[in-house]
Amino acid sequence: MKLYFTPIFLKKLHKSRRSQPKLAAKIRQSLDDLTDNPNTNSLRLHKLSGKNGDVWSISLNRSLRLTFTYVPDGILLLNFGKHEEVY
């Protein structure tokens, strides 16, 4: 499955690589898990409701979430951050 990135996602990822290298590694591992087996329990994959009906979310840790949507040939990564920042 191919991964696509929004500008917001790339900006946050670049910033996290410099300031929080462990977080960047966790994101990479979670993306590997998502593309290999999205039903892995550790991801806590769920579809959002309401105005975000086509958006899905996974948990990076207890407080951080990553949002994405499925596109015809892969996954478009939208955003990541604290719960209140991404929803």
Image: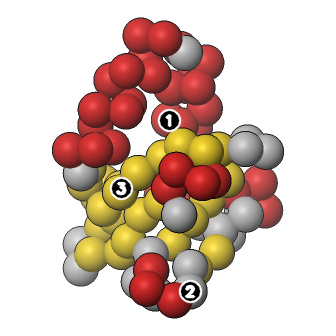
Residue 54's place in the image compared with 81, above or below, is below
The spot of residue 25 in percent (x, y) is 55, 25
Instruction: Name the amino acid type tagged 2.
Output: Ser
Q: Nearer the viewer, residue 8 or 34?
A: 8
Question: Tag 3: Cα neighbours inside 10 Å, few (<14), some, or many (≥20)?
Answer: many
At numbered mark 2, what does the secondary structure look like: helix, strand or loop? loop
Give the colour scheme shown. Answer: secondary structure
User: Could you give the CA–CA distance between mark 3 and mark 2, rounded to whole angstroms?
Assistant: 17 Å
Q: Is residue 1 visible?
A: no
Instruction: Name the amino acid type tagged 1.
Output: Arg
Residue matched to label 1: 28
The spot of residue 78 in percent (x, y) is 35, 57
Residue matched to label 3: 77
The spot of residue 28 in percent (x, y) is 50, 35
The spot of residue 58 in percent (x, y) is 61, 59
Residue matched to label 2: 49
Q: Are marks 2 and 1 in contact (CB under 8 Å)?
A: no
Q: Residue at horizontal 73%, vertical 63%?
A: 44
Mark found first going from the N terminus, 3 or 2: 2
Residue 15's place in the image compared with 78, above or below, is above
Question: Tag 1: Cα neighbours inside 10 Å, few (<14), some, or many (≥20)?
Answer: few
Mark found first going from the N terminus, 2 or 1: 1
Q: Is residue 62 visible?
A: yes
Question: Tag 2: Cα neighbours inside 10 Å, few (<14), some, or many (≥20)?
Answer: few
The disc placed on residue 42 is none
Where on the picture, by quarter, is residue 8? top left
User: Could you give the CA–CA distance between mark 2 and mark 1, rounded to whole angstroms?
Assistant: 26 Å
Q: Residue at horizontal 26%, vertical 49%?
A: 5
Residue 59's place in the image compared with 47, above or below, is above
Q: Nearer the viewer, residue 50 or 44?
A: 50
Q: Is residue 29 left or right of residue 77?
A: right
Q: Are marks 3 and 2 in contact (CB under 8 Å)?
A: no
